[in-house]
Image (tube, helix red, strand yellow):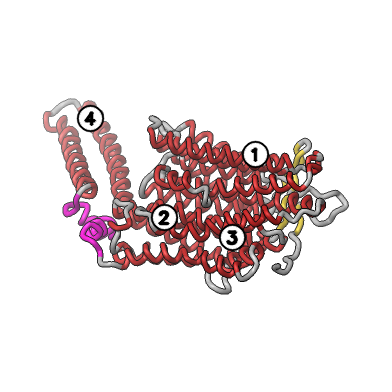
Amino acid sequence: MTLLPFLVIAVAAAALALLTRRRARVSLAIGIGGLMAAFVAAAWIEPGDVLIIGDGAIVTSTYQRLFLVLGTATGLLICLVGLATAWQRNVPAALLAALAWTGLALALPDPTIAVLAAAGGGLAGVLVTLVAPIDERGAQVSARELRAVAVAGALGLLAVTVLDPSAGSAVAGGAAVGLAFLAMVVAVALRFGAIPFHTWAGRLSQSAPETALPLLLAWAPAGFAVVALAWTYDTLVPVAGSLGSDLGPERALVVVIGSLSLLVGTFAAWIQDDVEHVVGYSIAQDAGLVVLALAASQSGVWEPARTWIVIFVLAKTAFAAWALALHATYSTRRIDDLTGWARRSPILGLAFAGIVLATLGWPGSVAWSARQDIVRFAISDPFGTLVFLGALTSLVYYGRLLAVGLSAPSISVQDRAALRLRWPRSMRGVAAGTGAGAERSDGADATDRAEASDGAKATQNETTEGPEATGGPKATGERTTSRSRAGDTLGRGRSAVDDLGETWRINRAPTATALVALLALIAVIASVGGFGIPQAAAEGPPRVVSADDSSGGTQEAPSPTPAP
């Protein structure tokens, strides 16, 4: 199956979810259903399929299919976490639109159109701010995201235009090659918010909807980075080689940018006061590895770089979901107010451990090897070893969060945990009478609804018996009985809906916790090479081959070369 069914489903569902956003339940059903249908369509994509459209082509690949399958699956999970915690109605539509654009970008051999499509995926993230009425917070999110995407897209477009061998633009010499290279690197660093382009990303993590952070800071920039990698190794390296340019000064500058993100990002995340900022700066830090992958001239970095990108977005999606569940559970983002969270929420603690493990990996794991290979191909020893060890300093801010979680629980954490983290049977008693705040209100509302329902039923019963008791006409009694039966049926239906809503309110904290644990498990599986990530990452950039070429629609990446 080609990519077209996925594109049609994703775009149509995104458009319908936006058009019906005034009817929240309808829009939600369309968005969640669209993500499910898009997941199925992505799983049915056949790698190597080539669809010729005019002078262009769409070439599917195993890596593209894997990216879309994992993107729709984790997108669906983060939406469910949002439903149980802090919902933002446009997140499903934004996810669908962004993945549609990104999936198209990964399938386009033409780098110019691919960059434009990848930029379109970033623009789709702005959909999360389209909630009427547009307030100052939404306007800030839109402005910051629009600026970053627009500048990055313009720089990427400049790079592929300046360095287009088919148009003869490479004759300008080594200066044009260096300019194009730096423009593309800055575009990727800006999209991720890598240091020193981190200011907008830090503010975005504070003002953007929490459920949208994985899309805005991880998935959409990752698609742009994959396109940039394809352009680097399919166009930049051959052109630079033909001109005899090794891009030494430019590569040194790129190494500095990537190393700064890895080293300074730890400090930036460690000094933050709230968990959302920690998530944002942790993404900026680990994005330094993507920048370093662009600095490497060896073709062997192609596979570990694309492997790391998938592991990176999965781990950061789980980290953002963890922060969202923690905030919803204890009603605070401040780290100092979360003392004892791991003691009171052991499942969240296990999920957090899995997220750290998936991000850093361990010796012998695919995640560890990918990080090590990227640094090794980009920086010679002994500096390469120092940068790799420096990248592991993220344990500092992870350790801070864990130390706070293992401390003696504060009174506020104890109270919130007693109300929000118990399972259904104990929660029913708490919600019914002993809770405070929202939980007590929910219990009182449930009691009021039950009393009102009982009163309505009693009134209906009296009405049913009325005609018979007063000796009224038989026909009148039958009509009254029919109306009472209809009223009973309607009352039971409303009661069932109320009970379902009450059950959801009671179970939403354990549900969010379980979903976060599932996201962490997916990230851990990816870190050990699950889902066929290394094999998919080894495929070459999308290309249209000639009829006499039996290699199919994609080309295998060259064998790794020894590190310098």
Residue 446 picture location, percent across and down: 22, 45
Pointer 4 local density, CA inside 10 Å: few below 14, some 14–19, many at least 20: some
Q: Residue at x 70, y 56 (%)?
A: 248
Q: Residue at x 12, y 32 (%)?
A: 469
| The C terminus: image quadrant | bottom right
Residue 167 picture location, percent across and down: 80, 39
Q: From mark 1 to mark 2, how far is it between C-alphas?
A: 31 Å
Of tags 4 and 3, which is closer to the observer?
3
Residue range of the region highlighted in magenta in the rendering: 409-436
The mark nearer the N terminus, 2 or 4, is 2
The reply to whether residue 427 is in sight is no
Residue furthest toward the bottom?
363
Q: Quadrant of residue 551?
A: bottom right
Of tags 4 and 1, which is closer to the observer?
1
Q: From mark 4 to mark 3, how far is it between C-alphas?
A: 70 Å
Q: Which residue is mark 1?
A: 116
Q: Which residue is mark 4?
A: 480
Q: Which residue is mark 2?
A: 278
Magenta: main secondary structure? helix
